[in-house]
Image (tube, rainbow, N blue to C red):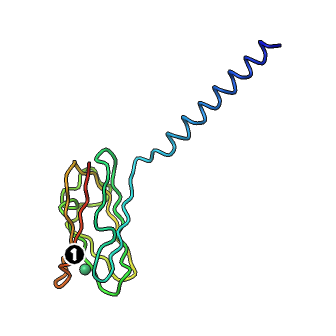
Amino acid sequence: MTCLADRLLAVACAGLIAFFVLWATACDSPEQTIHVMAEDFRFTPAEIRVSAERTIRLRIVNGGRERHEFKSPLLAHQIGGTTAPVGSLTVLPNRGAEAVMRAPSGIYLFHCAIPGHAGMIGTIIVE
Ligand SMILES: [Cu+2]
């Protein structure tokens, strides 16, 4: 009887371990998504940290009333992205824009390239 109980316990433990391994790997997405809000006249968040090991999906939403142009060396140096290389992303009011890329470790400044929007700046830290 004890032997049967031991076997059942061993099977239950093995099942539990398999469940946690599958759960952990399912949560390890190959992409990391950055959400940036462009408002009149700032980017939120202004500092973003991402991993150099995973693909970056950059999503910018314009929550303001002005057109904005997200520009960064990160976009100009896209590696292995699924979107066409772009130098900047234009984001119309109440609209969004997206780019997918990989980037080597570094600190990438971004800003809005629209004249008069000089205060719209930020940093993406890829580590
Ligand atoms: Cu702007």
Where 29 sits versus 122, above or below? Answer: above
At numbered mark 1, what does the secondary structure look like: helix, strand or loop?
strand
Q: Residue placed at 30% from the left, 86% from the top? A: 66
Where 39 sits versus 23, above or below? Answer: below
Q: Residue placed at 64% from the left, 32% from the top? A: 16
Q: Position of residue 119 (x, y in %)?
A: 20, 78
Among the 4 quarters of the image, the one containing residue 117: bottom left
Where 50 sits versus 65, above or below? Answer: above
Where 122 sits versus 91, above or below? Answer: above
Left or right of 74? Residue 51 is: right
Left or right of 20? Residue 92 is: left
The one of 2 and 7 positioned closer to us in this rendering? 2
Q: Which residue is mark 1?
A: 112
Quarter of the image that includes the N terminus? top right
Q: Residue furthest bottom?
A: 65
Q: Position of residue 12 (x, y in %)?
A: 69, 27
Q: Position of residue 120 (x, y in %)?
A: 23, 76
Q: Residue placed at 38% from the left, 53% from the top? A: 32
Q: Residue furthest right?
A: 1
The one of 42 and 76 positioned closer to us in this rendering? 42
Judged from the image, the quadrant occupied by ligand 1 is bottom left
Looking at numbered disc 1 in the image, what kind of residue is underneath it?
Answer: Cys
Alpha-carbon neighbours of circle 1 within 10 Å: few (<14), some, or many (≥20)?
Answer: many
Q: Residue placed at 78% from the left, 15% from the top? A: 4
The count of marks equals: 1
Asked whether mark 1 lies closer than 8 Å to ligand 1, one says yes
Q: Position of residue 10 (x, y in %)?
A: 68, 21
